[in-house]
Amino acid sequence: MRLFEYQAKGIFHKYGIPVPKSQVTSNAAFAEQIRDEIGDAVVLKAQVLTRGRSKVGGVRLVYPKDDITDAATRILGLSINNYEVRKVLIEEVVQVQKEYFIRVEIDPYLEKPVFIASKFEVKKSLTNGMETTENRIRVPIDLSFGLLDYQIRKIAVTLEVGKDLWDKFSRILNGMWKIFRELDVEFVEINPLVLNEANQLVALGAVIELDESALFRHAEVLENREPTDESQLKAETEKFGISSSQYKGNIGCIVNGAAFGYAIGDMLQSLGSQIGILLDVGDGAGDEKISAGLDILFRNRKTNCILIAIFGGLARCDKAANGILKSLTNNSKNQPLVVYLNGTNSEAGKSLLMHSNLFIEETLIDAVKKCLEVIKNK
């Protein structure tokens, strides 16, 4: 479970890692009041669980004379990689002298935590205009001993951190290590850690991803968990015993078997598209699961077309067809629906759907192509 930036910075502050002064809001009307408390020049950052927000206007520098309410309104109205922006972080402007990248994660090959750190420095080049050079280091951590002082010094020397900053640098790395261990973190990242004009180290960017299977040990995190489209989807599908995954595309898929879904994903990828929501109803799925899954996809406004692909084995295609008909009866307005049935009672299932307003395809690749054709025509 990835945390929003403002949540990650709240944890950083708790563990003694310096962060800029900031406040978060979901209402643009409070933006001016927040700026009065923080400072004249501020940065507005969209709070979404995806990268690339600065490329689409999700990060804005607001000067004292600028209309901050309008800027906040524009960000709160954005959709970034199909993630709706519901909150904006308003943060003080930090003048940057140097930038560093630091991350703690598990190295699957070494089977132990690793600190990854680098220094980014831009230099002028007579031939290529501007080029970036990088000092990079990976330091494995033995869980029996934890993060040791000499390892911190090794990272500081590689990044060319001044000796006068080593104590502060050490507190930051030790804070990251404590977060990693105490909160059962998949990874924790500062990107970037900056040296400001006051010669202070500040975590300008914060990313924390928690291990969902360990959340039962962290009640305080669960209490402050922000509802997202993905978490709401999982809560809704779990009631019916349906597994769900959410990706960046706009094609909703219902399948009986994860491997089947991945095959469809590969086909879409090769044709320049992507799955949006993938629902796996499992082997032996009856009409109730199919109907429930289809109802969920019909309600999803980001889904432009739906593909149902059932390979009958334990699952019976005629039962799947009954589930489709039940959902169509309950949903008068719905997205285009493409169906591929193969295996047990597939012909009976196709006969049941023959007079419905949907597309029935004989091969899986034809069904995938039909989805793309429908979206294009739409």
Image (spheres, rainbow, N blue to C red):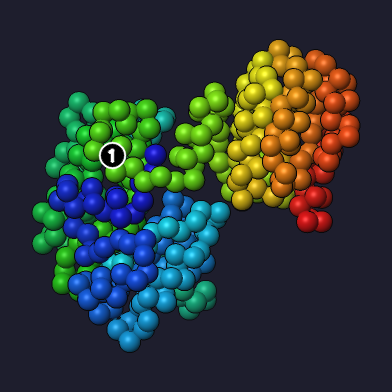
36, above or below 208, in the image = below
Residue 133 makes an appearance in the image = no
Residue on which the image places disc 1: 223
Q: Nearer the viewer, residue 8 or 359?
A: 359
Q: Nearer the viewer, residue 269 or 278?
A: 278
Q: Residue 343: where, in percent of width, then height?
A: 81, 18
Residue 128 makes an appearance in the image = yes
Label 1 element class: helix
Judge from the rendering whether residue 315 lies leftward or rightward of residue 136; answer left or right. right
* Residue at screen point 63% across, 25% down: 289
Q: Residue 279: where, in percent of width, then height?
A: 61, 32
* Residue at screen point 72% across, 30% down: 326
Q: Nearer the viewer, residue 162 or 311?
A: 311
Judge from the rendering whether residue 223 lies leftward or rightward of residue 144; answer left or right. right
Q: Residue furthest top?
A: 314
93, above or below 105, in the image = below
Kindly identify the amino acid type of the residue bearing the numbered disc 1. Answer: Glu
Q: Which quarter of the image is occupied by the C terminus?
A: bottom right
Count residues near mark 1 (Cα–Cα under 10 Å), then give few for <14, some for 14-19, many for 20+.
few
* Residue at screen point 33% across, 82% down: 63
Q: Within the image, what quadrant is residue 365 found in?
A: top right
Judge from the rendering whether residue 113 lies leftward or rightward of residue 263; answer left or right. left
Q: Within the image, what quadrant is residue 331 found in?
A: top right
